[in-house]
């Protein structure tokens, strides 16, 4: 009986020692773990993708700035309120956004490796980060289609919009600006929450 009790006490002491060692390892500063390396790698991916997507956005922005309506050639990008200016700055916003995400991811990876932060690399985080890119891609795809649809509505086979519809023409002229701002805003918001979730907050 005494022998059994001694063995149990010995096992308990060994278990407590193992727990203490694992706790020390978790709290050890400077330990490089897989999560930290993955997050730093993700930072490089953001920067690489930023430069790749930047060229695509430059070409798309140039195509939109050279756009003229097929239904009525008098309508161009300059016909829509504030649209030309926001299209001109969009490639810069995209590039700065990807570079900022890359720098933040590498900074977070270093903090994780030093044991000063934690991360959540789960499906929800990846979906939020992917949605930010999807919002930008949708902006490229949907804008030319939207411009043609609005132009056709404004032209109305040469008759224009009836004066009975108060403010409709002005709202249609402002719609492309609202659309691009909404899509860029959606990309910023989802990207922010994705990075925040990845940081463990």
Image (cartoon, rainbow, N blue to C red):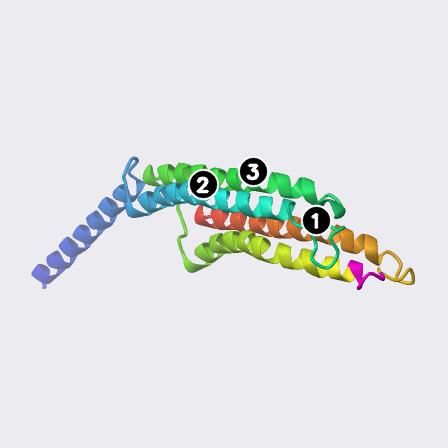
Q: How far apart are marks 2 and 1 (CA)?
A: 25 Å
Which mark, residue 96?
A: none
Q: Which of marks 2 and 1 is nearer the N terminus?
A: 2
Please tell me whether residue 151 is drawn above or below residue 44 in the rendered image: below
Badge 2 element: helix
Question: Which residue is pictured at 79% across the width and 59% down the height?
Answer: 155
Q: Is residue 158 magenta?
A: yes
| Circle 1 residues within 10 Å: few <14, some 14–19, many ≥20 | some
Q: Which of 152 and 158 is in front in this view?
A: 158
Badge 1 element: helix
Q: Which of 184 and 191 is in front in this view?
A: 184
Question: Which residue is pictured at 57% across the width and 57% down the height?
Answer: 141
Would you identify the image quadrant in which residue 71 lies?
bottom right
Please tell me whether residue 37 is drawn above or below residue 153 in the rendered image: above
Q: Is the magenta stretch mostly helix, strand or loop?
A: loop
| Circle 3 residues within 10 Å: few <14, some 14–19, many ≥20 | few
**Residue pointed to by mark 3:** 92
Q: Is residue 100 magenta?
A: no
Please tell me whether residue 190 is drawn above or below residue 165 in the rendered image: above
Coordinates of residue 2 in the picture (x, y in percent): 9, 60
Coordinates of residue 105 in the picture (x, y in percent): 42, 41
Q: Residue furthest left?
A: 3
Question: Which residue is pictured at 63% across the width and 55% down the height?
Answer: 144
**Residue pointed to by mark 2:** 51
Circles 3 and 2, Cβ within 8 Å, touching? The answer is no
**Residue pointed to by mark 1:** 177
Please tell me whether residue 44 is drawn above or below residue 69 in the rendered image: above
Q: Distance between the residues labelled 1 and 3?
A: 17 Å
Instruction: Please report the bounds of the magenta region as a residue range.
Output: 154-159
């Amino acid at each position: 009986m005494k022998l059994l009790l001694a063995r149990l006490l010995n096992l308990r002491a060994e278990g407590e020692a193992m727990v203490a060692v694992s706790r020390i390892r978790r709290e050890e500063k400077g330990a490089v773990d897989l999560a930290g390396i993955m997050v730093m790698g993700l930072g490089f991916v953001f920067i690489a993708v930023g430069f790749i997507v930047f060229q695509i956005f430059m070409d798309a922005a140039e195509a939109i700035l050279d756009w003229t309506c097929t239904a009525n050639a008098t309508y161009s990008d300059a016909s829509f309120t504030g649209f030309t200016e926001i299209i001109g700055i969009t490639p810069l916003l995209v590039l700065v956004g990807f570079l900022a995400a890359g720098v933040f991811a590498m900074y977070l990876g270093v903090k994780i490796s030093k044991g000063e932060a934690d991360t959540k690399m789960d499906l929800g985080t990846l979906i939020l980060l992917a949605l930010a890119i999807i919002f930008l891609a949708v902006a490229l795809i949907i804008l030319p289609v939207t411009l043609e649809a609005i132009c056709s509505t404004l032209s109305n086979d040469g008759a224009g919009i009836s004066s009975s519809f108060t403010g409709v023409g002005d709202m249609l002229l402002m719609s492309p600006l609202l659309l691009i701002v909404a899509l860029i805003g959606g990309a910023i918001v989802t990207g922010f929450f994705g990075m925040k979730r990845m940081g463990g907050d």
